[in-house]
Image (cartoon, rainbow, N blue to C red):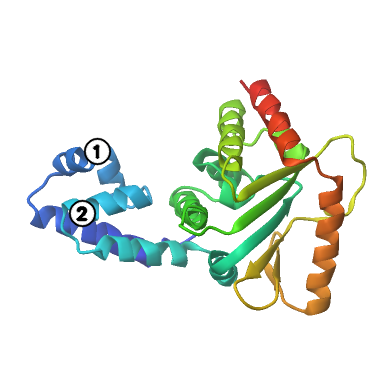
Amino acid sequence: MIRVPLWDLFAGELRRLRTDAGLTQEALGERVSYSASLVAAVEQCRRAPRAEFTERCDEVLNGGGLLVRIRDALMQEALMPWFREWVSIEQEATALRSYEPLVVPGLLQTEGYARALYEGAAQFVGEAVEQQVAARLARQAVLDGPTPPQFVVVLDHAVLARPVGGPKVMREQLEHLIEMARRPRVHLHLVPETVGAYPGLNGAFVLATPADGDDLGYLDNPLHGTIVERTVDVNSLRQTWESIRAEAMPHGATLAAITEAAKRWS
């Protein structure tokens, strides 16, 4: 995968602002509370810039928001072209309903879990992994805003048992799920392992409710994602969602099950 041009631009502007301020990488690292090795990695395009790092550098170097703006554009450009439209829909939705039979949804993934997926399932390597991980984590800001969408997630029990990234990554991921589920607008439900064949086994999907207008759906596959807009298809997804939701455990019982699963990964 070719490096995103905006990543080169970000690295160059960070280096220019740092040099103009008369700071070494070590000095900048001290001022923004990050290591000099991380500053060097970002300037050499070996690590994608994270939001907090970018904001601190922009403030310390008097960038006037330049680094933040470049990073925002970088995160958008790093997304697969067919996924960008859905991310825009996701960011403006008042409610999101997500079903995942195989993995934790992207909006709830930890950095380690996301990296393991990109390295293993998507088979990205090197800097391409860092670009995609950073873009995925940036998407999660939608849940941190002043008016986040109501986010209802149904997971199949298999998600808790698949060793994505190994025991440490799994424990951190499940603990993160519990933490996120304590938010008033995030609701988790688990389809228990005792349930046999049910409609959700046909594949993952998301339903988004915009502030005005009709619901939209999103389907993922190994090649690209598909936005579902036709009324008949959206209605079909709604019916499937209701069938899946009927098989799932309540929120409280789900958190108890995830807590027990996290202990087993210790």
Q: Along the line of sight, which residue is nearer the eye, 245 or 118? A: 245
> Can residue 112 be seen by looking at this rendering?
yes
Left or right: where 91 falls relative to 249? left
Left or right: where 235 falls relative to 255? right
Q: Along the line of sight, which residue is nearer the eye, 217 or 82? A: 217
Tell me if label 1 and label 2 are in contact, CB under 8 Å.
Answer: no
Q: Residue at x 55, y 51 (%)?
A: 124
Name the spot of residue 144 as percent of width and height, x first. Answer: 47, 52
Q: Which residue is drawn at 90% across and 40% down?
A: 195
Label 2: state its secondary structure.
helix
> Can residue 43 be seen by looking at this rendering?
no
Residue under pointer 2: 59
Reply above or below: 211 against 58.
below
Quadrant of res 151: bottom right
Kind of residue at disc 2 = Glu
Name the spot of residue 180 as percent of width and height, x first. Answer: 57, 42
Res 33 label? 1
Label 1: state its secondary structure.
loop
Tell me if mark 2 has few (under 14), some (14-19) or many (20+) residues whose alpha carbon lies within 10 angstroms of its own. Answer: some
Reply above or below: 154 against 241.
above
Q: Earlier in the sequence, mark 1 or mark 2?
A: 1
Name the spot of residue 24 as percent of width and height, x first. Answer: 13, 44
Q: Along the line of sight, which residue is nearer the eye, 226 or 174? A: 174
